[in-house]
């Protein structure tokens, strides 16, 4: 907790005690929102105890802005388990945002379609997740000031916020999907056989992030909303090659409606 308070003190000094109420983690190719709305921006490399993102499409800044009369803190890019960071390192910013004062965390990501009814540039509201990353960010000593040792996980993605997000999508005439997000450690993409397994076990989209942050956010008592930008078919028996460039390109196509949706959701929260 000492390190968290040191981080918070540094951030408050840089932002004149901004006190955000909503946090947003912006995934691959989705960082434009933080370019348009920015009152304060701090590179992760300058923030005590933050680790640097090394992934293309992630600028690696903590951005503070007032949007739709709400005070927002945005992570312009996240850190991933596959980069070699520990689970505690990649979820540390969630604990910091909680300590800064947020009540709601919006998690976004780029994900591969497992559900065969999904197509690139679709947006999917996460109704639940399956953690297949082989570990849990809550392993280790528990900090009772943040949450209890054995947190309930029966409703991480709050139904009332999902309802608000669906209303926001309807208002904007956005056809939005719903589904279960399956998290693998990465960085390799899945084989066709693995995708068939995920589909049979109930996954609708697959990615390499979000779940650790959602677990910690729920543990910290935050309301969580998750949105996946479907960027590609997760794998293909035909042997079609997948690439990170494809992910970024599909996210660019979806960014206008994604941004509009986030702004509308913020209005209702």
Image: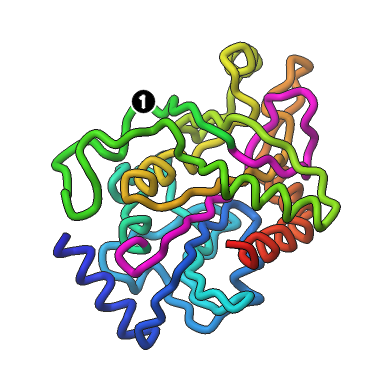
Q: Residue at x 51, y 41 (%)?
A: 157
In the rendered view, would you say 243 is above or below 264?
Answer: above
Which quadrant of the figure contains the N terminus?
A: bottom left
Which quadrant of the figure contains the C terminus?
A: bottom right
Task: From the top left corner, tell me how far across and down residue 236 is, in percent.
Answer: 73, 20
Task: From the top left corner, tell me how far across and down residue 214 is, in percent.
Answer: 43, 43
Asked if residue 78 lies left or right of residue 47, the reply is right
Render colour scheme? rainbow
Q: Residue at x 51, y 57 (%)?
A: 25
**Crowd band around label 1 with a 10 angstrom C-alpha radius: few (<14), some (14–19), many (20+):** few
Q: Residue 216 appears in which quarter of the rendering?
A: top left
For the residue pair 212 and 44, the one nearer the viewer reads as 212
* Residue 61 showing in the rendered view: no
* Residue 256 showing in the rendered view: yes
Asked if residue 233 lies left or right of residue 106, the reply is right
Q: Residue at x 48, y 48 (%)?
A: 224
Residue beneath label 1, please? 134
Picture mark count: 1
Task: From the top left corner, tell me how far across and down residue 91 is, in percent.
Answer: 35, 50
Asked if residue 126 lies left or right of residue 73, the reply is right
Q: Residue furthest front?
A: 160
Q: Magenta segment, which residues?
A: 98-126
In the rendered view, would you say 194 is above or below 264?
Answer: above
Task: From the top left corner, tell me how far across and down residue 151 is, in percent.
Answer: 29, 36
Asked if residue 56 is among those painted magenta in the image, a careful observer would answer no
For the residue pair 178 and 198, the one nearer the viewer reads as 178
Q: Residue at x 75, y 50 (%)?
A: 249
In the rendered view, would you say 28 is above or below 206?
Answer: below
Q: Secondary structure at mark 1?
A: loop
Asked if residue 252 lies left or right of residue 165, the reply is right
């Amino acid at each position: 907790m000492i390190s968290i308070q040191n981080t918070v003190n540094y951030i408050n000094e840089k932002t004149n005690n901004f006190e955000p109420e909503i946090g947003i983690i912006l995934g691959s190719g989705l960082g434009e929102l933080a370019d348009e709305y920015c009152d304060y921006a701090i590179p992760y490399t300058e923030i005590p105890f933050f680790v640097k993102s090394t992934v293309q499409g992630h600028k690696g800044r903590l951005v503070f802005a007032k949007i739709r009369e709400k005070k927002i803190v945005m992570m312009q890019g996240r850190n991933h388990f596959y980069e070699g960071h520990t689970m505690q390192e990649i979820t540390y910013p969630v604990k910091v945002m909680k300590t800064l004062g947020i009540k709601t965390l919006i998690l976004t990501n780029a994900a591969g379609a497992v559900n065969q009814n999904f197509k690139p540039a679709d947006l999917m509201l996460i109704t639940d997740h399956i953690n297949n990353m082989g570990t849990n960010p809550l392993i280790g000593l528990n900090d009772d000031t943040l949450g209890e040792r054995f947190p309930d996980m029966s409703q991480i993605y709050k139904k009332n916020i999902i309802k608000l997000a669906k209303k926001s999508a309807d208002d904007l005439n956005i056809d939005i999907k719903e589904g279960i997000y399956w998290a693998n450690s990465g960085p390799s993409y899945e084989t066709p056989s693995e995708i068939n397994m995920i589909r049979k076990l109930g996954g609708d989209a697959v990615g390499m992030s979000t779940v650790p942050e959602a677990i910690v956010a729920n543990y910290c008592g935050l309301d969580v909303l998750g949105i996946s930008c479907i960027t590609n078919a997760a794998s293909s028996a035909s042997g079609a090659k997948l690439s990170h460039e494809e992910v970024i390109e599909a996210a660019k196509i979806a960014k206008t409606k994604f941004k509009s949706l986030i702004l509308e959701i913020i209005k209702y929260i």
